Amino acid sequence: MGIKKRKKASEVLKDTNFVIAKKGTFAETFPEIKSATVQVTEKGSFRSHSIQSKNCTYSEKNLGEYIDCNNPFCYNGGFSICNIVRDMVKDNKTHDESTEICQGYKGSPKGKRNYGRCTNTWKVIVDLEYFS
């Protein structure tokens, strides 16, 4: 029997209905950003236990609110990349580097049982270019 899929942060957000706020694309959320490049290196547990880290690069075309965790036992896992971008826009920054910790927990497939925090982390490098 295989591992049952646990919902990740972006899937939990997609299934959430907000009363006050509305969901939008990256371009709708950040109209002042011309281009964005996000490089992430995730370290921790993955479906293939021989893998210890995973590198990914995102642009404004494929960024959502969250970067999802790749730990197959993690529920609601990932971190909000848009919180980082919001802070950068507020301070008019074009470059930022940080380390992020997974917000999720090791849990049952439906997320009802909590077996402790997920220990995956990400090194994040964000570069933004603004419209003049």
Image (cartoon, helix red, strand yellow):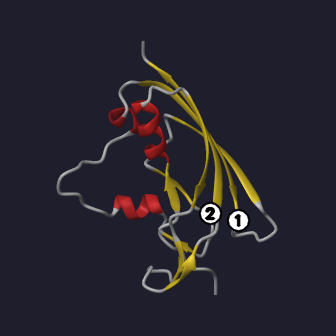
Crowding at label 2, few (<14), some or many (≥20) Cα neighbours within 10 Å? Answer: some
With 61 as the anchor, is 96 left or right in this view?
Answer: right
Instruction: Identify the element where label 2 is drawn.
Output: loop
In space, the residues marked 2 and 1 are separated at their CA atoms by: 9 Å
| Residue 24: x %, y % from top left | 32, 43
At x 51%, y 56%, the residue is 79
- The answer to whether the residue labelled 2 contacts the one labelled 1, judged by CB atoms less than 8 Å apart, is yes
Q: Position of residue 98 (x, y in %)?
A: 61, 45
The residue tagged with tag 1: helix, strand or loop?
A: loop
Residue that mark 2 sits on:
70
First in sequence, mark 2 or 1: give its number: 1
Instruction: Classify residue 86 as left or right of residue 115.
Output: left
**Quarter where residue 120 is shown:** bottom right
At 42% from the left and 12% from the top, the residue drawn is: 132
Foreground tag (2 vs 1):
1
Which quarter of the rendering shows the N terminus?
Answer: bottom right
What is the x, y in percent for residue 41? 69, 50
Q: Nearer the viewer, residue 112 or 124?
A: 124
Where is mark 1, residue-wise?
44
Depth order, front residue of 61/85: 85
Q: Is residue 85 above or below residue 107?
A: above
Q: Looking at the picture, which amino acid does disc 2 mark?
A: Asn
- The three-letter amino acid code for the residue at tag 1 is Gly
At x 39%, y 64%, the residue is 12
